[in-house]
Image: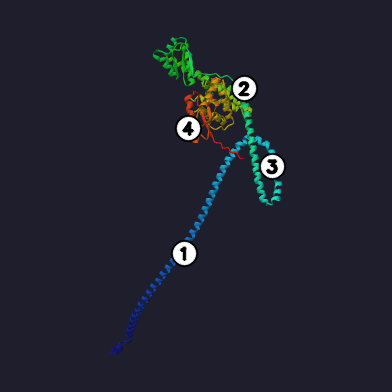
Amino acid sequence: MGLPVMAALPTPFAVILGLAIGFVAAYAVLIVMGKKQLVAAKHQAERIIAEAKSQADVIVKEANVDAKAQFIEKLEQFEKQSSKVRDELKEAERKLEKRGDNLDKKLDTLSTKEKMLEQGAQRLEKRETELTQKENELTEVLSQEREQLLRISGMGIEDAKALLLNRVKDEVEHDAAEMIDRTLTEARESATEKSREIIVTAIQRYATEHSSASTVSTVDIPSDDMKGRVIGREGRNIRAFEKATGVDVIVDDTPGVVVVSAFDPVRREIARQSLETLIQDGRIHPTRIEDIVREKSEAVAREITERGKKAAIEANVGGLNRKQIDLLGRLSYRTSYGQNVLAHSIEVAYLSQIMADELGLDSTLARRCGLLHDIGKAVDHEVEGGHPQIGADICRRFNERPEVVNAIAAHHGDIEATSLYTPLVAAADAVSASRPGGRRESLERYIKRLEQLEGIATAFNGVKQAYAIQAGREVRVIVDANRIDDASASKTAYEIAKRIEEEMTYPGEVKVTLIRELRATEYAR
């Protein structure tokens, strides 16, 4: 029945309806097929992703393995390089240490040889011809012995050469040691003889008298009434005088004398002259005392300058600073163990010049060193330290030459002598100070003091010998090394110094030098 209905429909409408039905059917088929394809594509994508993950894991594992292998390889290379560098550094360090030790040994050896060769240089030059001749003879002997050894022993050339070299080396070293010892002995004997000759000549050519000054000054008083006027009512005059001059005035029962005492010799001289003027004038009161002291201070200052200039002219030393001239003038009021220091300085200047002339050195520089060597004594009561260091500092400020500064600082051996003029000044100073008559001391007392110094030192256990030198300023003590060790050496020197302080009276200070030497002697028979 349906067919008739469709047949009854118009033809275009039937076509459209057929197309719509076909389109719907086709769309339904497409939807079904799309869903199947979508599911298939999803499965395929999941499969691809799984395969990609698997491949990625494999790649990552392979990359980790390769990276670890490369890291291990690089680490091994680095360790090898580090080990090589460490070995090279250790080797370089060892070589440097060895080279440093060798250099130190060579420096010590060269220093010792330099001192020895300086003393024997002239003698060694004379021996040079003999050594050349002996070398030629040795060369000839070596040639003969080489032929004989090769012929007799049948040794090879290298063995024979080594044997000959060892033998010649021993002989040459022995001959050289004997020659050096002989040359040094001759040089010492010649130097000792020449030094004695120079010093004796200097002493004979310049042996002057020295003025002596005491540590106190006395002023004559015409009467005991004048003593009362010097003291003044309730002691006001003497107090004013002591305050103005800085000295101590001693008025005792000694008739006709008033004693002026002061540590500073210039103050003492000003006080002495002022008191003499006051006594002559008769007007003694505080105002007058101040006026006279002021006048005498100016007069003494002028006198100090004049004495300094006179000393510089007498010693023929020019170019001195005004302050240096004043300090030299002050030395005329300074005494050292009864010896006037300015006169002593002038004498040392002449003695240094004479010895410098004998040695072919600069006599002008030697005179300058000698004149200024004790300049520190002018202010050693005002400045802390010993007079050599004080004098060196003063002259260094006035741009004195290094030779002069070293001669001042080292003439008592306080520091090392770096100039040829320093030992000349030290010798001249010792000659001027230590010769009998140079200072206020008899020959018997001088010898007795030195004997006492040596006796105190030799009284200690372990002391073998003791020698007093430098006019009694130093005592050198030689001890038995088997009985006194290094630890007790310093203690022994200290005890000797303390014993000298307790039992002796002496000017300045005494230096105790203890020498401990161990000598080992064996005989080869």
Which image quarter holds the C terminus?
Answer: top right
SS class of the residue under badge 1?
helix
Q: CA distance from mark 4 to mark 2?
A: 43 Å
Q: Quadrant of residue 252?
A: top left
Which image quarter holds the N terminus?
Answer: bottom left
Q: CA distance from mark 3 to mark 1?
A: 75 Å
The label shown at residue 491 is 4
Residue bearing the label numbered 3:
135
Reply above or below: 362 against 260. Answer: below
Q: Nearer the viewer, mark 2 or mark 3?
A: 3
Tell me: 135 left or right of 272: right
Amino acid on which the number 1 mark rests in the picture:
Asp
Count neighbours of disc 4 (C-alpha within 10 A) and say few if under 14, some if 14 to 19, many if 20 or more.
few
Q: CA distance from mark 1 to mark 2?
A: 103 Å
The label shown at residue 66 is 1
Q: Are marks 4 and 3 in contact (CB under 8 Å)?
A: no
Please report whichever mark, 1 or 2, sits nearer to the chain's N-terminal start. 1
Amino acid on which the number 4 mark rests in the picture:
Lys
Horizontal and vertical percent for residue 265?
A: 49, 20
Residue bearing the label numbered 2:
204
Q: Residue at x 69, y 38 (%)?
A: 130
